Amino acid sequence: MITPPPDPNLAALRLELARLRAGRGWSYDELAEHSGLSRRTPIEIEQGRTVGTLATWHAIAHAFELPLGDLTARLCDDHTPSGT
């Protein structure tokens, strides 16, 4: 029997975004400027109103000069990814 993967830890990902933004001292406007996203997008993500698209997270990762995988690794904070 195949076991489905656990749910992603979206709360941890939202908190990581907030932590990174605060660490740089960036406002939502500054993150928007660095990422090319609208100001509303990171607000909606941090407040849990939206998950964001892969393209959105890609832009956010580039804004913070991080590989996308480093940023999205938070999705597995409460479990171990299969195969590891």
Image: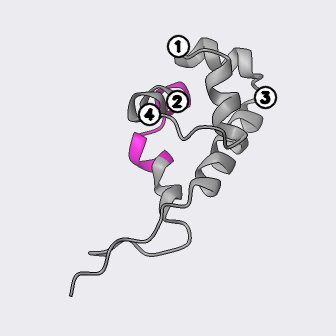
The CA distance from mark 1 to mark 4 is: 14 Å
The CA distance from mark 1 to mark 3 is: 18 Å
Q: Nearer the viewer, mark 2 or mark 4?
A: 4
Q: Which residues are magenta?
A: 60-71
Tell me if 34 is positioned left or right of 8 in this view.
right
First reached walking from the N terminus: tag 3 or tag 2: 3
Is label 2 in contact with label 4 (beta carbons under 8 Å)? no
- Residue that badge 3 annotates: 25
What label sits on residue 53 in the rendered view?
A: 4
Q: Nearer the viewer, mark 1 or mark 3?
A: 1
- Residue that badge 1 annotates: 36
Q: Amino acid at mark 2?
A: Ile
Q: How is the image coloured?
A: one colour
Is label 3 in contact with label 4 (beta carbons under 8 Å)? no
Name the secondary structure under disc 3.
loop
Residue 58's spot in the image, x, y percent?
Answer: 42, 31
Is label 1 in contact with label 3 (beta carbons under 8 Å)? no
Residue drawn at (54%, 19%) of the image: 35
What label sits on residue 60 in the rendered view?
A: 2
First reached walking from the N terminus: tag 2 or tag 1: 1
Q: Nearer the viewer, mark 3 or mark 2?
A: 2
